[in-house]
Image (cartoon, grey):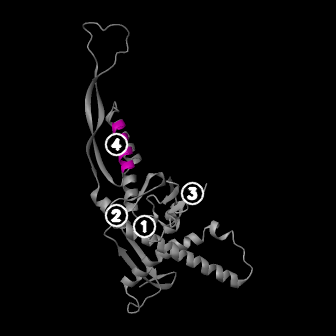
Amino acid sequence: MEELDEYPYRFVVVYSDKLNEQKEKTFQRHLKKERTTLEKAIKRFEDTVYHCRADAEEALEGFQKNNNSRYFDYSFVLEPEEHIEKRTKRGRPKKEETPNVITVYRPQLQYWKESEEVLEEKKRKMSTFVLITDKRNHREISDLEILQTYKGQEAAKTRFRLLKSPQMIDGFFVKKPSRVEALGIVFVMALLIYGILEHRVRENMKQEEKPLVLAGNRKLFRPTGQVLLKQLQEINVIYIRQNGQILRFLPDNIGEQTGYDLTIYVSKQVEKIVN
């Protein structure tokens, strides 16, 4: 038990050994971007030479300050190199002229690696979240039941988020409380059908080897209800004229996965053509 703003609460720390896929992709994308940026900076730094060690050390300190990384460890050494100083006089050098050799310092990357401990700690934190509740009695509700309740809220929140959109609410104006209640019942029933549609398709897709190919060449095994409703807005029916008759057929359609009877579109499969 802990107190928050002088009120006692119960905190449940939850760790998932399977990192959320979306978080993993986002983190790996940011990690790749940081790696690429740092590699380019290191390459530019290695191509620079300094004419005295003090300048090189100052430049190295500034580089490490401006390119500090939590996820990558690297180190430089300042290697002295002998260079022939460029002549300031015009014309060809004389035979007895001795070239002036100077010592310069070039930063060289000594080692470069990912900080495994920091990366693991980051992933561990990304896989951890804390639940807070005022249900302090462990006998009344266990930690597992708190987690299950929390997980169950996600489906409800996702559904009711649709009803909160301006497109669903702003277009309705009702004057009586009874009509508000009736409208709420209609919305809940629609939401129930919406959930059944999504559930049926996702369950049926578990038996399929190929994903649903939707508009824009999107391939999904777990489509959302919104995606399904958009696909079902138009049902294409193939009409074939043959021997004075019209034959109706349905092409491959997402409706097959919904579990609904789609014969209403082709129930009158054969129709005579009246001239």
Which secondary structure lies at badge 1? Answer: helix
- 10 Å crowding of disc 2: few (<14), some (14-19), many (20+): few
Tags 2 and 1 touching, CB below 8 Å: yes
Label 3 close to label 4 by CB (< 8 Å)? no
> CA–CA distance between discs 2 and 4?
44 Å
The question of residue 117 being in magenta is answered with: no
Give amino acid for label 4.
Answer: Glu
Type of secondary structure dominating the magenta stretch = helix
Of callouts 2 and 4, the N-terminal one: 4
Mark 3 or 4: the one toward you: 3
Residue 34, how many percent across, how many down? 38, 49
Residue at disc 2, secondary structure: loop
The mark closer to the camera, 2 or 4, is 2
Check whether the beta carbons of the residues at disc 2 and disc 3 lie within 8 A of each other.
Answer: no
Secondary-structure class at tag 4: helix
Segment tinted magenta in the rendering: 32-45
Residue 170 appears left or right of 269: right
Q: Residue at x 40, y 61 (%)?
A: 22
Residue bearing mark 3: 273
Work out which residue is located at the far bottom of the displayed protein and give it. Answer: 139
Does residue 129 show up? yes
